[in-house]
């Protein structure tokens, strides 16, 4: 395949990664922005979403589309409930202290990981996509006779991958509308800006935190449900999404949702493109290097505010 | 209406209030005066439940509110205008008012109109981010946001700090209007002229305790106390 079609294919793969990373990173950014909690267990909520999706899809088993639809609805709710329970049992008892919650979420990471290993075993679990049509992509070539429409061999994607990109865009847009246009969105933004004043105006901050922690986990789970038909569910799959989400949140600007989405797209696209042309390891190395450069030259991130 | 009895409160292991007593009646302005660090702002925060109370009580209309969670206190009818305004700076003026309206036990539409009629300038700025308002407009919004609760008791922490004279006069007029409407006002203020022009009672706070309380007719005869406690 020529370089042009090959690059386009890499961009498409990158867009799928970017969609899932953006969703997952937005969850992490919400939790950090509003609660000031660095949630090291965020990747495990992603993993739980994937494993629960596999379990639901396998249990229903009538038709892949039915199982997947049920997983898309139930898995984020189930993972959100687990997160809310974790918040009540652990984080709220630590008074959301920034340092102690880091240690606590590291503990939660191992609890979720080992509980999944003990319950579902170490095997990677496939989930059948609800639809997966191969879509050949045309390419325009410039030749002496003018513009020619060609169908390069291998230049194709699947309808499911396009669905992942579209679904992630819709979910992020819906989240934006929720935050900007609803009463609870306003409460969340006020709590983010000044926790004490929010309390002084009757906002039950601890309940808001529980909902935010659940929402952040549910977003990670949604990302996982979307990607699990492409990647398979596995008890160790939370590491990469956690690393890439942290990178996106730091590059975008701590607590800045637009910044996190922008950085998620940049990181996801570069991860996809570099993985296709070179290797996934190089993609992670370059992303981590980018974080270092951002921390040195623009510590507040791309769209974060300088302190 | 509002009665603070033998209040001991502080931050963690640091105790700031050591048996403070205040009583504010309906339609009365009660000023708290004292040097920096005396415990005036901590008193207001403790009443709002924002600072842990070690002992003593806060009662509103005979109901003990000091045992309630902090977020339930505004709905009982206590509004706070904190020092430095503490607006939700990235939210619009309208959104700040909406936050104020959330806890109030009243018709939100009526209260919204009432507050904007009190500060018509805010009506022109409803979609503007609160942080971009001038200092005076920010103070108007801080008062308006607290009034959205339709409070029975209003706690004001140095509301005229850093304002130009015309704005000070506007805030003073708002305080007098609220007092005439029957709102009980607990005011922390350092400006002697502002205190003497609106207060019905003044309590002097020293080392976390109320040392002396004066009625309005005693102010002129006891000016030396203002000098002693305010350092003026």
Image (cartoon, coloured by chain):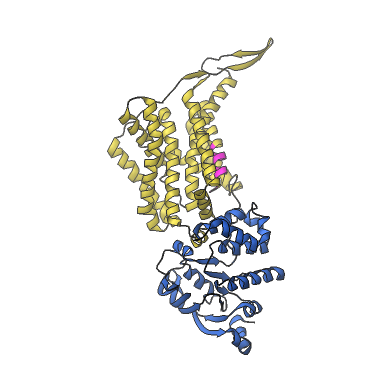
Chain colours: A yellow, B blue
Q: Is residue A282 visible?
A: no
Which residue is more in the foreground, B123 or A35? B123
Depth check: B92 or A260 in front? B92
Q: Is residue A103 magenta?
A: no
Residue A36 picture location, percent across and down: 48, 53
Relative height, residue B101 to residue A52 (above, below):
below
Query: Which residue is nearer to you in this view: A302 or B184?
Result: B184
Picture coordinates of residue A237 (x, y %)? 39, 36
Place of residue B7 in the rendered image (x, y in percent of width and height, measured from the top left): 44, 76
Q: Specify the quadrant of the image occupied by residue B218.
A: bottom right
Q: Residue at x 69, y 10 (%)?
A: A144
The overriding secondary structure of the stretch rendered in magenta is helix
Relative to A172, is A237 on the left or the right?
left
**Residue A274 higher or lower than B129, as above or below:** above
The x, y position of residue A157, in whole percent, is 50, 22
Above or below, comparing residue A82 to residue B187 in the picture: above
* Figure disc tally: 0
Q: Quadrant of the C terminus of chain A?
A: bottom right
Farthest top residue? A145
- Let me know if residue A261 is in the magenta part: yes
Foreground of the two, B145 or A157: B145
**Which residues fall within the magenta stretch?**
A254-264
- Quadrant showing the N terminus of chain A: top right
Would you identify the image quadrant in which residue B230 lies?
A: bottom right
Q: Residue furthest bottom?
A: B221
Instruction: Answer whether residue B47 is visible to the viewer in this image.
Output: yes
């Amino acid at each position: 395949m020529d370089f042009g079609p090959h690059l386009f294919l890499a961009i498409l793969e990158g867009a799928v990664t970017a969609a899932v990373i953006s969703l997952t990173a937005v969850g992490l950014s919400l939790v950090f922005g509003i609660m000031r909690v660095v949630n090291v267990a965020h990747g495990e909520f992603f993993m739980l979403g994937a494993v629960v999706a596999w379990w639901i899809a396998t249990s229903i088993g009538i038709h892949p589309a039915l199982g997947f639809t049920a997983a898309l609805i139930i898995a984020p709710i189930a993972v959100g409930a687990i997160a809310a329970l974790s918040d009540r049992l652990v984080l709220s008892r630590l008074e959301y202290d920034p340092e102690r919650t880091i240690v606590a979420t590291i503990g939660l990471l191992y609890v979720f990981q080992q509980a999944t290993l003990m319950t579902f075993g170490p095997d990677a679990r496939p989930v059948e996509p609800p639809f997966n049509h191969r879509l050949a992509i045309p390419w325009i070539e410039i030749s002496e006779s003018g513009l020619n429409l060609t169908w390069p061999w291998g230049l194709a994607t699947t309808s499911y991958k396009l669905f992942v990109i579209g679904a992630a865009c819709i979910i992020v847009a819906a989240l934006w509308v929720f935050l900007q246009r609803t009463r609870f969105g306003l409460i969340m933004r006020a709590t983010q800006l000044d926790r004490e004043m929010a309390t002084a105006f009757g906002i039950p901050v601890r309940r808001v935190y529980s909902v935010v922690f659940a929402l952040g986990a549910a977003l990670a789970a949604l990302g996982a449900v979307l990607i699990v038909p492409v990647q398979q569910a596995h008890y160790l799959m939370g590491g990469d999404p956690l690393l890439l989400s942290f990178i996106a949140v730091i590059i975008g600007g701590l607590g800045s949702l637009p910044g996190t989405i922008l950085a998620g797209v940049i990181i996801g696209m570069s991860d996809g493109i570099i993985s296709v042309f070179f290797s996934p390891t190089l993609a992670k190395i370059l992303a981590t290097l980018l974080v270092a450069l951002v921390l040195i030259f623009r510590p507040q991130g791309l769209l974060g505010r300088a302190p | 209406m509002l009665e603070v009895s033998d209040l001991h409160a502080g931050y963690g292991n640091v105790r700031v209030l050591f048996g403070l007593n205040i009583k504010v009646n309906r339609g009365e302005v009660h000023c708290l005066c004292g040097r920096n660090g005396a415990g005036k702002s901590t008193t207001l925060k403790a009443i709002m439940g924002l600072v842990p109370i070690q002992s003593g009580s806060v009662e509103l209309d005979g109901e003990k509110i000091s045992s309630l969670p902090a977020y339930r206190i505004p709905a009982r009818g206590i509004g706070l205008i904190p020092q430095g305004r503490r607006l939700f700076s990235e939210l619009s003026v309208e959104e700040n008012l909406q936050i104020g309206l959330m806890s109030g036990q009243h018709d939100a539409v009526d209260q919204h109109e009432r507050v904007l009629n009190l500060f018509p300038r805010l009506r022109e700025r409803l979609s503007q981010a609160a942080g971009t308002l001038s200092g005076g407009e920010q103070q108007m919004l801080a008062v308006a946001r607290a009034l959205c609760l339709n409070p029975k008791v209003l706690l004001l922490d140095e509301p005229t700090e850093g304002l130009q004279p015309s704005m000070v006069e506007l805030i003073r007029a708002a305080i007098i209007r609220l007092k005439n409407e029957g709102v009980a006002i607990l005011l922390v203020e350092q400006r002697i002229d502002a205190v003497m022009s609106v207060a019905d009672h003044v309590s002097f706070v020293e080392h976390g305790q109320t040392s002396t309380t004066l009625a309005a007719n005693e102010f002129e005869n006891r000016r030396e106390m203002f000098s002693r406690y305010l350092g003026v």
